[in-house]
Image (cartoon, rainbow, N blue to C red):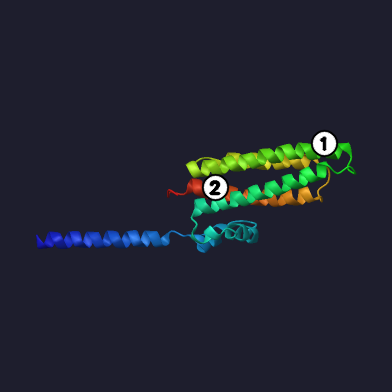
């Protein structure tokens, strides 16, 4: 009996040590942000975006993906506000005003698609949230195509929007490949 008791005691200790070690290896917060953003071509923007939320210090990968999507949605809202303001500018030609109106509609679609992406990630991080993100990117492309030129305020904001969506796409890919449940 004494030998069996020692064996079980050793097994329990090994299991506890392994569980603690596995938990310690799971990155969170700043460490995870640095790991994720080191893979991004827009590393500085990625770190800035993911660190912008006070909850990011204890965030897991799914939390960080949602933070990036929230920031992208805020950016889309900013584009929408600017598009609405520009539509009413009487100095703009009717063609540009129509392009802005079309852009406004596609930005509304992009906002909706980002909300759908967040909902998909909340329900199941393994879902293909990238479909919604790619639809949001297609919407911003349609917006850009509606307005001539590439140096106006909306074009500048749309480039940032693309970068934010690409950060979220990279994170959703990591979530989809992750063996852990978040």
Would residue 163 be seen by someone viewing this image from the given angle?
yes
In the image, taking residue 109 as reference, residue 91 lies left or right, namely: right
Would residue 130 be seen by someone viewing this image from the given angle?
no
In the image, taking residue 77 as reference, residue 169 lies left or right, namely: left
Q: Quadrant of residue 99?
A: top right
Instruction: Specify the label residue 98 is tagged with.
Output: 1
Identify the residue at image location x=32%, y=60%.
Answer: 18
Mark 2 or mark 1, earlier in chain = 1
Q: Quadrant of residue 53?
A: bottom right
- Viewer-side residue, 140 vs 88: 88
Which residue position is annotated with label 2? Answer: 172
- Viewer-side residue, 147 vs 6: 147
Which corner quadrant holds the N terminus?
bottom left
Q: Secondary structure at mark 2?
A: helix
Identify the residue at image location x=65%, y=42%.
Answer: 111
Q: Nearer the viewer, mark 2 or mark 1?
A: 1
State how many labels appear.
2
The location of residue 145, given as percent across then percent down, is 78, 40
Say above or below: 80 vs 24.
Answer: above
Gap in angstroms between the C-alphas marked 2 and 1: 35 Å
Identify the residue at image location x=59%, y=52%.
Answer: 68
Q: Secondary structure at mark 1?
A: helix
The location of residue 19, given as percent across then percent down, is 33, 59
Say above or below: 106 vs 54.
Answer: above
Instruction: Specify the label residue 71 is tagged with.
Output: none
* Crowding near the residue tagged with mark 1, few <14, some 14–19, many ≥20 C-alpha atoms within 10 Å: some
The location of residue 158, given as percent across then percent down, is 73, 48
Say above or below: 130 vs 24.
Answer: above
The location of residue 177, given as percent across then percent down, is 48, 47
């Amino acid at each position: 009996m004494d030998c069996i008791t020692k064996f079980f005691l050793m097994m329990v200790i090994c299991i506890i040590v392994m569980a603690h070690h596995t938990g310690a290896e799971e990155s969170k917060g700043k460490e995870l942000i640095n790991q994720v953003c080191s893979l991004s071509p827009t590393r500085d923007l990625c770190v800035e975006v993911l660190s912008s939320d006070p909850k990011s210090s204890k965030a897991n990968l799914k939390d960080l993906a949602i933070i990036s999507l929230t920031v992208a949605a805020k950016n889309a809202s900013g584009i929408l506000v600017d598009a609405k303001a520009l539509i009413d500018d009487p100095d703009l030609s009717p063609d540009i005003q129509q392009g802005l109106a079309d852009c406004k509609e596609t930005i509304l679609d992009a906002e909706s698609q980002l909300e759908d992406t967040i909902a998909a990630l909340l329900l199941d991080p393994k879902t293909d949230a990238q479909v919604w993100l790619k639809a949001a990117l297609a919407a911003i492309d349609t917006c850009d195509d509606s307005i001539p030129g590439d140096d106006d305020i909306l074009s500048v904001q749309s480039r940032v929007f693309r970068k934010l969506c690409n950060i979220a796409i990279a994170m959703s890919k990591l979530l989809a490949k992750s063996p852990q449940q978040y």
